[in-house]
Amino acid sequence: MTKSLKTPVGESSAGAQKLHRGLGKRHVQLIAIGGAIGTGLFMGAGKTIAVSGTSIILTYLLIGFFAFMVMRAMGELLLTQLDYRTFADFVADYLGDKASYFLGWTYWMSWIVSCIADVVVCGGYIQYWFPDSWLWLTALFILGLMCLCNFFSVRLFGEAEFWFAMIKVVTIVALIVVGVGMVVVGWTSPNGVTASVRHLTEPDVFLPNGVFGFFAGFQIAIFSFTGIELVGTVTAETKEPEKILPKAINSIPIRVIIFYVLSMMCIIAVTSWPQISPEASPFVTLFALAGLPAAAAVINFVALTSAMSSANSGLYACTRMLYGLSTEKLAHHKFGQLSISSAVPVFGLIFSVLCMASGVFLLFIIPDVMKLFTIVTTVAAIMVIYSWCMILLAYLAYRKKRPDLHKKSIYKMPMGIPMTWCTLLFFAFTVVIMVFDYDTRVALYGTPLWFVILEVLWRRRKYQEQRREIIN
């Protein structure tokens, strides 16, 4: 038998307050969709296509498939016990407190660095309209807005994320419709390129930079899917999670096909691979070819809302992860206290915002927005891979320790244990190939420092606990 949770779902350490189940079906569905459409799709699509060629379609299918397997494992575990607040809770049950401590704080840090990147990029987008504005000030302004969205109630967060995600969905659907229309009529661009599906089947552009070009697209693709696991942090605040969670997870494959595969196919079919610039958004290029004079401004606005959506979701994930760690006594007890009026983990929110705000001032050290974005997103991608792997390891432990729960499960992971091992091996491979690219190699070599810090803090924590037991 696994150990029971120390604190029932929704209660603080004091046991007096509860998280509100204020998220409905439409909120969770759009949060799941928003999580599947990350900033990396708008920011890094041009560079990824330029490096990988048409094989980028296979890249997104591969990453999407294995990310879906992680979500299926997470979904089965979360629904075995509705007392679980986040996936850190079932990791604590099946892998122990130390594993939960490492996972919870690593996942929190992955969102901290992601949000730093997002708000910095938001500041850069705002400079499109206000070029004389101070980048660090506009970034802090965006962070303040996200703090307000998360401060008052979970429903306000849900509404904000609903509309942020809706803008992304409408834009990508519009791009697909426009792209298909241009291919059907045989649109010819001013530079003489005719839109055609033949651009997708040209053998020379499948692997234009060889197999390493194909592998180079993995890091951006993984970062693009960062946030897909967010549905695992909203379970405690979702109405009827046993009905809504499976629907949200099961819709991931169709979202991958629509938002990633079809959009990439339309961009390449209309533009052709040689005409896609790694320095410009292919979304802007396609709309510009369609004769939309305001394409740059429109896509700039969409990219701004996409980055705001990611930051909004990340701040939510940070505060709920700290809340879960606190109630498990793996973080300061203040992080488990909820505001009286809105039941929001206000201390965790404030702490996370302050950490993000301090990160914004990295702009004074690295003033290049894209360079800073590349560094922090690579670190975030590595930490997300770690978090996904911990979910999978917890699933393996669950299958070994609680076969009775698996037998009764209403939402079993397809191919169970064999598929879990295949997914773990795939993610291990994605980490290994990061060694071959300079930018990802620097982040990969630097990331272990974070785990050294966690190990030191964990040992210090256990030492203090032993001291208190001796004194008592």
Image: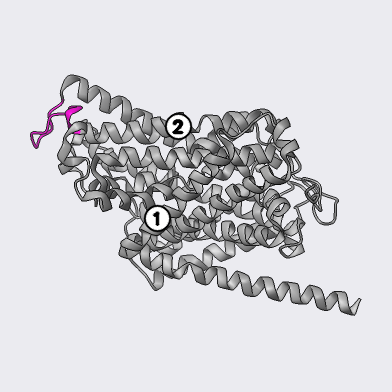
Most frequent secondary structure within the magenta stretch? loop
Q: Residue at x 60, y 61 (%)?
A: 352
Please tell me whether residue 190 belongs to the stretch shown in magenta: yes
Furthest residue in direction left, as rendered: 192
Q: Tell me which amino acid carries mark 1.
A: Val
Please tell me whether residue 183 belongs to the stretch shown in magenta: no
Q: Is residue 141 visible?
A: no
The picture quadrant where one finds residue 373 is: bottom left
Q: Tell me which amino acid carries mark 2.
A: Arg
Q: Residue at x 15, y 43 (%)?
A: 274
Nearer to us of marks 1 and 2 is 2
Give the magenta range: 187-199
Q: Residue at x 62, y 46 (%)?
A: 396
Question: Of 104 and 80, which appears nearest the observer?
Answer: 80
Whichever of callouts 1 and 2 sits on the residue coming sooner in the sequence is 1
SS under mark 2: helix
Q: Residue under circle 2?
A: 255
User: Residue 264 at x, y = what percent?
Assistant: 30, 36
For label 2, the crowd category at 10 Å Cα-Cα, with few meaning under 14, some 14 to 19 and many 20 or more, is some
Label of residue 121 in the image: 1
SS under mark 1: helix
For label 1, the crowd category at 10 Å Cα-Cα, with few meaning under 14, some 14 to 19 and many 20 or more, is many
